[in-house]
Structure formats: structure tokens, C-alpha cells
Amino acid sequence: MENEVKLAAGAVVSLAIATAALVVLPYLQVRDVTPPPGLKPYTSAQLRGRDVYIANGCVYCHSQQPRDRGLGPDLARGWGRASVPGDYFYDKPHLLGSMRTGPDLFNIGARQPSKDWHLGHLYQPRAYVPGSIMPSYPYLFEVKDAAEPGDEVLNLPPGQGPFGRVVVARPEALDLVKYLQGLDHTYPVLPPPLKAKAGAAAPAPVHAASAAAS
């Protein structure tokens, strides 16, 4: 009986330590986080596009969390500055991702702002990025004999569309592109306040505009 009590006590202590380290302390660190001044809330169309992003599993191949330059070459790759908690203020749930089968998308809206590029890339990725292993998403589009009023027709490279017909983006594709175009975190951010002596100068903001690559 004594061994069982020790085992149970050890398990409770281990669980308490893990909970404190992985839940309580992180919560205390980010509970008062506010959005950076340059961060804008998602529009209704971007929120719908975010749902399409989640539904199609984009988070399984793309991260949204550039690392500090001391931890990896993300800045050199053109993915932007290291992210900070405030960058995700409007993300519920967050889409940090843990795999990089494809590039990080934290600043894809700054690197590639073209709507035509995104639509065409979703329809046929290899027409825009040779050798890409990204799957195409033809069900986000509709092939028609002729465009109708209000249709968003894709401007595909020669030979990439159906002969004699047009490819039209469905609303889900348009919303997804608006979400991707909104992923632009090139605004400056301030590091966490330091406990410095009174009268000490505040740290300079980290500017990220130069970190966004084309």
C-alpha cells in the first residue's frame, strides 16, 4: 500500500509541475498581450477564407511563425522578423503550424500580394512554382464554356487552362485568397518592456518592412 501511495503522489507532483510549466506560466506571460498598432482585425471575408484554409489542411504543410535569426535562417529566406505573441491576437485558434513542407506564410501577403497569382497557384501550383509538391484545389473553381457577369476568371499561363473554356473562382477560393493577402506582419513591433532604472531610454522598435522578401 505504501508503494501505491508514493506512486500516486509522484504522479500528482509530476502532473502539477507539467501543468505549471506548460499551462500556468505561459498564460501568465501572455494574458495581458495587446495587438500591435499595425495589426488589423480580420474582415468577414478573411475570416471565411481562414476557415477554408483550416478545412483544406493548409496548416499541416505551412507554418506561420518565423524564427529568430539566432535559431534559423527564416529572415534570410525572406519570411520576415520573428513573430511575437501580439501578432496572433485575433487568431482563435492560432495557426502556428509545426511542419514546413511548404514555406512559412506569416508574411505571404507582403511577399506575394497578387490576387491573380494566388488564384492561379491554387488551381495549378506547378504552373507558378516548377517542381512544387503542393496539391491543386480544382474544387475551389468551376470550368465554364463562357464567363457570366460577376465571374472572377483566372488569368492562367498559356496551356494551363482547359482549351476553349474558362476557369472561374468559387467564393471559397476568393475568400481564401483574401485571407492569404491579409497575412502581412511587416509592421514594427516593440520588444517586451524591460525592468530598467527610471529614466532609461525605451528600446527601439523592430522594423520588419525590410525583412519581407518578394
Image: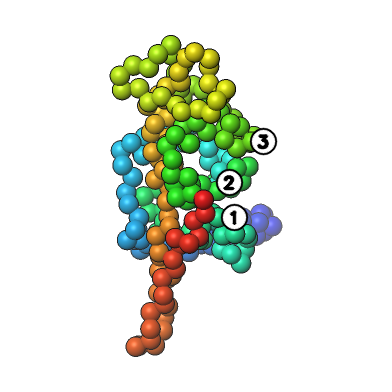
Which of the numbered marks, if any, corresponds to residue 77? 1
Along the viewing direction, whichever of 140 and 44 lies nearer the viewer:
140
Query: In the image, residue 204 lies at what x, y percent?
Result: 41, 75
Label 2 with label 1: CB-CB less than 8 Å: yes
Please provide percent x and percent y for residue 112: 47, 45
- Residue 50: % across, % down: 41, 38
State the residue position of label 2. Answer: 103
Label ID, residue 46:
none
Contact check, label 3 and label 1, Cβ < 8 Å? no
Mark 3 is surrounded, within 10 Å at the Cα level, by few (under 14), some (14 to 19) or many (20 or more) other residues, namely few
Based on the displayed image, in which of its 4 quarters is residue 18 positioned? bottom right
Other residues around mark 2 within 10 Å, as few (<14) / some (14–19) / many (≥20): some
Horizontally, is 72 left or right of 112 in the view?
A: right
- Indicate the position of residue 137 as horizontal and vertical percent values: 52, 26
- The kind of secondary structure element at disc 1 is loop
In three-dimensional space, the C-alpha distance between marks 3 and 1, rounded to whole angstroms, equals 18 Å
Tell me the residue at 38%/83% (across/down): 201
- Amino acid beneath label 1: Arg
3D distance between C-alphas at marks 3 and 2: 14 Å
Choose between 32 and 156: the one closer to the eye: 156
Eyeballing the image, is 214 above or below 123? below
Q: Which residue is drawn at 32% across and 52% down?
A: 40
Residue 201 visible? The answer is yes
Where residue 131 is drawn, which disc sits there?
A: 3
User: Which of disc 2 and disc 3 is earlier in sequence?
Assistant: 2
Mark 3 secondary-structure assignment: loop
Q: Which residue is drawn at 52% across and 33% down?
A: 121
Q: Is label 3 in contact with label 2 (beta carbons under 8 Å)?
A: no
What amino acid is labelled 3 in the image?
Answer: Gly
**Neighbour tally class for label 1: few under 14, some 14-19, many 20 plus, Cα within 10 Å:** some
